[in-house]
Amino acid sequence: MMDETIGYLIKDIELSQRPRERLEKFGAEVLTNAELLAILLRVGKKGSSAIQVGQRLLADFDGLYGLQKAGFLQLCEVEGVGPAKAAQIKAAIEVGHRIAGHQREDQIRITGPQDVADQVQYKMAILEQEELWVLLLDSRNQLIKIEDLYRGSLNSSSVRPADIFKSGIRLNAAALIIVHNHPSGDPTPSPEDIQLTRMLIEAGEMLELPILDHIVIGSQGFCSLKALHPEMWK
């Protein structure tokens, strides 16, 4: 795999090693992030190849997660990008987002924390402030709906159980999964996260609408409170 820190002109690369040719022969998964961006950008600028512009984008925005968070005007300010190329990048990111959140005709079944992360991590890991979402499940653990309920600092005093369970009761859900993000990127649950989870488990038991898990999402991965603290579910 090519080193993304190396600067080179595409015309100086052997034909078989150029990004589009390598994608055609080996598939997109073998390309570096800078090479993928180069294909989106198509051309660079005077004195710099598209790969070099891709490298600059990754450096300026600290990788793909930062690029996903960047605004349209921020991309336009990068030398060699401009409105047309910024639009191509934002459109590609949105296509990826829609694919990641696509709901199949046979509903998505949640069997564990990874299934939850697959549904929410693409969007949630880049949020700049904490948000709390609720996954509503039917009796077969199929996903009914994802609700975005809270934004801002989350703890047991700021989150109302009535808000958490209202949609589940209205839509006749059989169970709920709580998900929230850590903008720091570290998904390790805080003491406040554990306290909030205990409160919601107790409320769910009283309402006969159980909380199956509480997943914390970060850019570094995700954590399941049920996996870390199974004693809370006994």
Image (cartoon, rainbow, N blue to C red):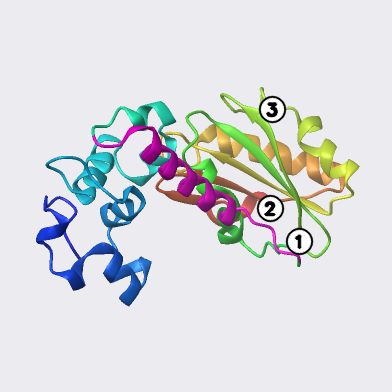
Q: Quadrant of the N terminus?
A: bottom left
Residue at horizontal 69 percent and vertical 58 percent from the top: 103
Which SS class for mark 3? Answer: loop
**Residue 82 x, y percent position in the rendering:** 33, 33
> Helix or strand or loop: what does disc 2 sit on?
helix
Residue hosting label 3: 159
Query: Which residue in the structure is indicated by mark 1?
Result: 142
Q: Residue at the spot x=83%, y=44% of the render? A: 168
Q: Residue at 20% x, 40% y: name it.
A: 45
Magenta span contains residue 65: no
**Label 2 sits on residue:** 233
Residue lying at 65% horizontally and 40% vertically, measured from the top left: 197
What segment carries the magenta color?
80-105
Residue 219, by quadrant, is top left
Q: Which of marks 3 and 1 is nearer the N terminus?
A: 1
Left or right for 43, reference 224: left
Question: Residue 92 vs residue 152: left or right?
Answer: left
Q: Which amino acid does label 3 sit on?
A: Val
Q: Which of 201 and 92 is in front in this view?
A: 92
Q: Position of residue 183 (x, y in %)?
A: 45, 34
Residue 53, disc: none
| Position of 154 relative to 92 (above/below) | above
Q: Which part of the image, by quadrant, shows the C terminus?
A: bottom right
- Mark 2 nearby-residue class (10 Å; few <14, some 14–19, many ≥20): some
Amino acid type assigned to the residue bearing label 1 in the image: Gln
